[in-house]
């Protein structure tokens, strides 16, 4: 009964442990992309990694997508916007800084404004006259503010910009990107491709066809399609789209090129993908999809972060033993506090066992993925100290 | 025949079927919440709970995750209504109704829409060839959501006259997370995009009318942590701003309450000593386990801190003044048995 093997975080690193500090300190790491399903603490992880890297000497910018207000506040910023804002209150990690010329640790944070970013791309690519035409087009307005993939696409666009700027001006040497909480694991990698294949595809040619006169495409099939579109979308929408496409025509090439460049940047050695998950069935399943997908696209996967792991209990008393003992105590003293503690302990043991089982399953399928397990904090993250604590846990430091 | 009619009359008389005690007029239950709070679990449990008194309940998912198939341990669902479970047993142990499931994907919904309203059988194929289907379902802003909600709308308002399809007594929608819910339900005018312009607008408008009616309730799932509770409050405000009927707040994954307030106070004040716990353990038959004593005390402090946070968040939830329901965190995870267990709790508390 007492010889069960240990389960929980300690045994997990029977798989490979992720060397977070090694990753942050490596000057070749220029971009860290945190991806994962919604609600697993992606944004907190991004901010904590950024802070830790900055306090260990990197010049960091953290690009968040839609941070909870409290998280922005935890970085001392009331409202993040499309421009990087300095985070105040950083101090050197022990053993870092101090030499002349080190200055102060540096971290900026920003939040993606997808419409603003889209507008800027249009403005930078088109003549002022044409840009105005595009920006005022109803179809463009709808596309830039509500197309589900725009956020993903613009996150990648912003990343490309930040990278190019920091290369040119030396502003940052590490960009930490938080990805949008995609509906599906694949959205953010697919979006650039999807948008450029749309801009490049038959559909666009179809829209352009009437504007460009009768083409070979003009067939019975095409007539049927335009008819159907008019029925479903309405003539006005179709006209807006045609105007948009005609105005946008010359920009397509540029867009495709930029999307391609960002994609290559993501594949490059200086980029590290971290898949973030919680020790839950769904989140780990989603994480497995990410891992598959990243390797399929030859994206450099650095590892898996499992947030909010239940802390490993000491001792080797099983849940059943704890419950039995609690029952005996309650029998004599219905209000026994220790009985309550034993019941809590049983609950904890069961949860830790389940989490370990889920992680083992992941590990069996993906033994090559180094993992960092972050124990759940008792409290919520409010401030830089909270983020610092998360960063320390990410790096494997354990409170004594 | 006479006997059956009589039976039905009796049942209406003596056991008036009330789909949901707290929301008797609601036929469409929309379940949303911050990511990771367990909204799919709550939606599934709610469907099982409603089926305790309802003949036919439909559980819909729209995010392409096949979460229903996983929860109910069945093959991935097609775009078709499938019977997936028997509901919770009803009052007096009567056998529960049937829970059906529907996985709605935008491509199939669009093709169905086109063939239903425009008789576009073959043209549908041609549309696909030109990339129009992909355009409409992935790129055309707002159209995707109208297609998804349009199908939910269609399923929610069938009646007995519709011979070919099942008429549902209740529909439960496992909806997108709180951050996207207003846009998804098509009420966010500035974001509704194309759906606000073309003929599809009529469709969108009818859907919105149903969503805003008293036959719909949007329930929000949260856990007792700061960010999810903040998102709950923001979500309620946004739904109300858009005139959507806010239903209940489901507080999920609540920690066990094995320590009462007095115990927690003792833990926080450091009055629970190693010696006392060790002596108790010995009495309980767990001798000589120093590690366990340390573990219990550490866990007690951790738990006391979490409970204080949970209690503070619970006060905030209560101040939101919604009907509130509580579900425990199940240590073993959520399997099918767990869903029924949660369904029973939702039923006891009156949501189902």
Image (cartoon, rainbow, N blue to C red):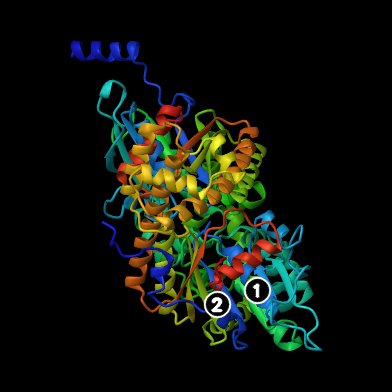
> Vertical placement of B215 versus B230: above or below?
above
Left or right: residue A70 compared with residue A100: left
Residue B170's x, y, as percent? 40, 32
Label pair 1/2, CB-CB below 8 angstroms: yes
Host chain of mark 1: A
Task: Say which element carries label 1.
Answer: helix
Q: Which mark is residue B97?
A: none
Of pointers 1 and 2, the one earlier in the residue sequence: 2
The image quadrant where one finds the C terminus of chain A is bottom right
Residue A92 x, y percent position in the rendering: 73, 77
- In depth, the one of A340 and A378 nearer the eye is A340
- Residue shown at the point (69%, 74%) measured from the top left: A61
Q: Quadrant of residue A22?
A: bottom right
Say which chain tag 2 marks.
Answer: A
Residue B96 at what x, y percent from top left?
28, 30
Q: Secondary structure at mark 2?
A: helix
Q: Is residue A151 visible?
A: no
Q: Residues within 10 Å of mark 2 (few under 14, many from 20)?
A: many
Q: Nearer the viewer, residue B325 or A380?
A: A380
Q: Which residue is mark 1?
A: A52
Residue visible at 58% across and 77% down?
A32
A230, A219: nearer the viewer = A230
- Which quadrant of the figure contains the N terminus of chain A? bottom left
Answer above or below: position of A258 versus A46.
below
Residue A298 % position (x, y): 45, 82
The residue closer to the viewer here, A110 or B306, is: B306
Q: Disc 2 designates what residue?
A: A20
Could you tell me if residue A233 is visible in this image? Answer: yes
Category of crowding for the residue at label 1, using alpha-carbon neighbours closer than 10 angstroms: few (below 14), some (14–19), many (at least 20): many
Q: Residue at x 46, y 34 (%)?
A: B28
The residues tagged by marks 1 and 2 sit, at their Cα atoms, a distance apart of: 10 Å
Whether callout 1 and callout 2 share a subunit is answered: yes
């Amino acid at each position: 009964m007492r010889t069960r093997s240990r389960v929980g975080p300690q045994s997990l690193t029977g798989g490979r442990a992720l060397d977070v500090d090694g990753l942050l300190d490596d000057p070749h790491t220029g971009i860290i992309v945190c991806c994962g399903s919604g609600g697993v603490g992606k944004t907190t992880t991004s901010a904590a990694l950024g802070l830790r890297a900055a306090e260990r000497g990197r010049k960091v910018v953290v690009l968040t997508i839609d941070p909870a207000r409290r998280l922005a506040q935890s970085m001392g910023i009331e409202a993040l916007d499309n421009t990087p804002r300095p985070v105040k209150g950083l101090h050197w990690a022990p053993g870092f800084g101090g030499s002349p010329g080190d200055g102060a640790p540096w971290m900026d944070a920003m939040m993606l404004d997808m419409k603003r970013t889209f507008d800027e791309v249009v403005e930078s690519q088109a003549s002022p006259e044409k840009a105005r035409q595009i920006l005022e087009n109803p179809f463009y307005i709808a596309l830039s503010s509500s197309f589900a993939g725009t956020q993903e696409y613009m996150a990648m666009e912003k990343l490309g910009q930040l990278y190019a700027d920091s290369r040119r001006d030396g502003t940052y040497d590490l960009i930490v990107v938080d990805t949008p909480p995609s509906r599906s694991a694949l959205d953010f990698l697919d979006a650039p491709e999807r948008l450029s294949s749309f801009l490049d595809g038959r559909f666009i040619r179809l829209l352009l066809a009437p504007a460009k006169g009768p083409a070979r495409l003009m067939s019975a099939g095409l007539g049927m399609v335009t008819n159907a579109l008019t029925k479903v979308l309405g003539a006005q929408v179709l006209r807006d789209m045609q105007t948009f496409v005609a105005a946008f025509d010359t920009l397509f090439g540029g867009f495709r090129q930029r999307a391609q460049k960002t994609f290559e940047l993501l594949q490059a050695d200086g980029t590290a993908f971290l898949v973030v998950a919680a020790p839950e069935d769904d989140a780990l399943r989603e994480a497995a999809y990410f891992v598959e997908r990243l390797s399929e696209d030859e994206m450099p996967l650095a590892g898996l972060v499992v947030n909010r792991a239940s802390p490993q209990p000491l001792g080797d008393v099983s849940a059943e033993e704890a419950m039995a003992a609690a029952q005996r105590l309650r029998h004599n003293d219905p209000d026994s506090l220790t009985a309550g503690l034993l019941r809590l302990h049983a609950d904890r043991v069961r949860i830790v066992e389940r989490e370990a089982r889920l992680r083992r399953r992941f590990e069996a399928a993906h033994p090559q993925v180094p993992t960092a397990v972050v124990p759940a904090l008792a409290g919520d993250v409010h401030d830089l100290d909270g983020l610092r604590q998360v960063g320390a846990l990410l790096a494997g430091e354990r409170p004594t | 025949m006479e006997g059956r009619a009589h039976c039905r009359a009796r049942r209406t008389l003596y056991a008036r079927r009330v789909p949901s005690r707290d929301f008797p007029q609601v036929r469409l239950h929309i379940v949303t919440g911050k990511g990771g709070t367990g909204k799919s679990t709550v939606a599934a449990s709610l469907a099982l709970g409603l089926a305790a008194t309802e003949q036919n309940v439909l559980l819909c998912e729209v995010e392409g995750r096949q979460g229903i198939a996983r929860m109910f341990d069945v093959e991935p669902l097609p775009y078709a209504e499938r019977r997936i479970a028997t509901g919770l047993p009803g009052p007096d142990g009567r056998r529960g109704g049937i829970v059906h499931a529907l996985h709605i994907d935008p491509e199939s919904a669009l093709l169905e829409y086109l063939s239903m309203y425009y008789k576009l059988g073959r043209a549908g194929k041609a549309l696909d060839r030109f990339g129009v289907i992909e355009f409409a379902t992935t790129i055309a802003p707002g159209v995707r959501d109208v297609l998804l909600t349009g199908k939910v709308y269609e399923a929610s308002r069938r009646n007995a006259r519709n011979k070919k399809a099942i008429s549902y007594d209740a529909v439960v929608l496992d909806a997108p997370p709180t951050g996207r819910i207003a846009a998804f339900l098509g009420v966010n005018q500035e974001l509704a995009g194309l759906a606000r312009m073309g003929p599809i607008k009529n469709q969108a408008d009818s859907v919105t009318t149903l969503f805003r009616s008293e036959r719909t309730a949007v329930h929000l799932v949260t856990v007792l942590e700061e960010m999810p509770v903040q998102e709950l409050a923001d979500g309620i405000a946004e739904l109300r701003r858009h005139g959507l009927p806010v239903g209940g707040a489901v507080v999920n994954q609540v920690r066990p309450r094995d320590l009462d307030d007095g115990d927690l106070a003792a833990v926080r004040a450091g009055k629970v000593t190693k010696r006392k716990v060790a002596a108790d353990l010995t009495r309980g038959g767990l001798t000589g386990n120093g590690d366990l004593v340390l573990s219990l005390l550490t866990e007690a402090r951790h738990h006391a801190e979490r409970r204080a946070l949970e209690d503070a968040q619970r006060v905030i939830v209560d101040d939101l003044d919604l009907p509130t329901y509580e579900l425990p965190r199940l240590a073993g995870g959520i399997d099918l048995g767990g869903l029924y267990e949660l369904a029973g709790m939702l039923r006891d508390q009156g949501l189902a």
